[in-house]
Amino acid sequence: MAESLIFKQLFDQTSATFSYLLADADSGAAVFIDTVYERHERDLSLVRELELKLLACLETHCHADHVTGAWLMKHMTGCEIMASGQSNIEMLDRSLSQDSRVEFGAHALTVIETPGHTAGCISYLLEDESMIFTGDSLLIRGCGRTDFQQGSARKLFHSIKGRLFALPDRCIVYPAHDYSGRTASSIGEEKKLNPRIGGQANENDFVTYMDNIRLPHPMQLEFAVPANIKAGRPADDQLPEQPDWAPVVTTYSGVLEISPQWVASHIHNIHILDVRTTVETAEESTRISGAQMIPLDELRDRIAEVPQKVPVMTLCRSGKRSVLAYNILREAGWPKVANISGGLLRWNEEGLPVNRA
């Protein structure tokens, strides 16, 4: 990696998405690859803190598992939005294709078309061939699924074997996702060790494998793809609201979320509402100190028990069902409500304090 290159790998825990900020240290010119809507404030803060000039938000493809933050970043920085012309993404400032170059200061990324996961997948190769950003085409010990969005196992085989595996073995692979805590690999590693396409795997081996995978559709598929076709631009063109009572993040669906770390450090100034069912709490003894316990199915009848004068943070096991509690409170007029991101699972993963009932 060139000495004058600033490189930051960022992660969204909810969707297991990696975003990448690359910049020229001398000029400050920068590009962002695969931003995430809910991480916009984090990403924008990093650009500003490093005093960078963001030139472009680059998409590896039209994502189905999260909403891009490209429109928000363009609105705030004036950067361009770039992706493959085959991605179906509207509002592109520049359509990219094979061998397109994206320059930022003394550095450049070259586009390699890698269709198969979707028809519009592309990868970005740094000019010295030391780094390749593969999106969902090539993952660490895996690859993207090929069963929707004009996917093709045969095309993906040739994209990986013919184009990505033709790169130097030393080239570091940076994917768009990893679900096992891994951050990077290399072309040499994947050529040898990737269980789907590495080693002596041929086209028939790969296609048969991919055609027989039975995976559930991504949880955000129904709204992520339509949103990403518009580069993450909300239907009402409104920026996320920014309350002054907590550093919340607004999800694309309009839910205010708060990090467990912030809640734990401000626990005496907020109110935690735990809406797990009685069955769950009977089986799981973990409690957060001071949390009010009202099962979700009882909340509407007991809503008067929830205070209104302090910020209320809703909680469940995973942070999914507590979104409904958030909506119930907001619709009933509670002015300061946020959902604890990732729920009790993330709270425990981050080692935050709990009690045992």
Image (cartoon, grey):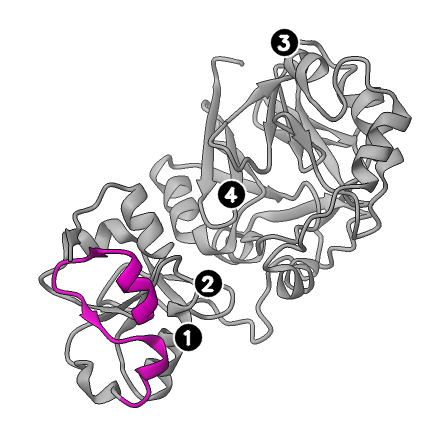
Q: Amino acid at mark 4?
A: Ala
Task: Give the residue at x 82% y 21%.
Answer: 161
For residue 324, the mark is 1
Label 3, residues with CA under 10 Å away: few <14, some 14-19, many ≥20:
some
Q: Is residue 221 left or right of residue 179?
A: right
Query: Which residue bears the numbered disc 3?
Result: 170
Q: Is residue 29 left or right of residue 153?
A: left
Instruction: Name which quarter of the figure residue 59 lies in.
Output: top right
Task: Give the residue at x 40% y 78%.
Answer: 327
Q: Nearer the viewer, residue 188 or 246?
A: 188
What kind of element bears circle 4?
A: loop
Q: Is residue 140 above or below residue 346?
A: above
Disc 4 from disc 2: Cα separation: 15 Å
Give percent across and percent down for residue 248: 32, 61
Query: Which residue bears the numbered disc 4?
Result: 16
* Badge 2 or badge 1: first in the primary sequence: 2
Q: Nearer the viewer, residue 56 or 213?
A: 213
Q: Amino acid at mark 3?
A: Arg
Q: Nearer the viewer, residue 216 or 260?
A: 216
* Magenta-highlighted residues: 275-301
Query: Which residue bears the numbered disc 2?
Result: 251
Q: Amino acid at mark 1?
A: Leu
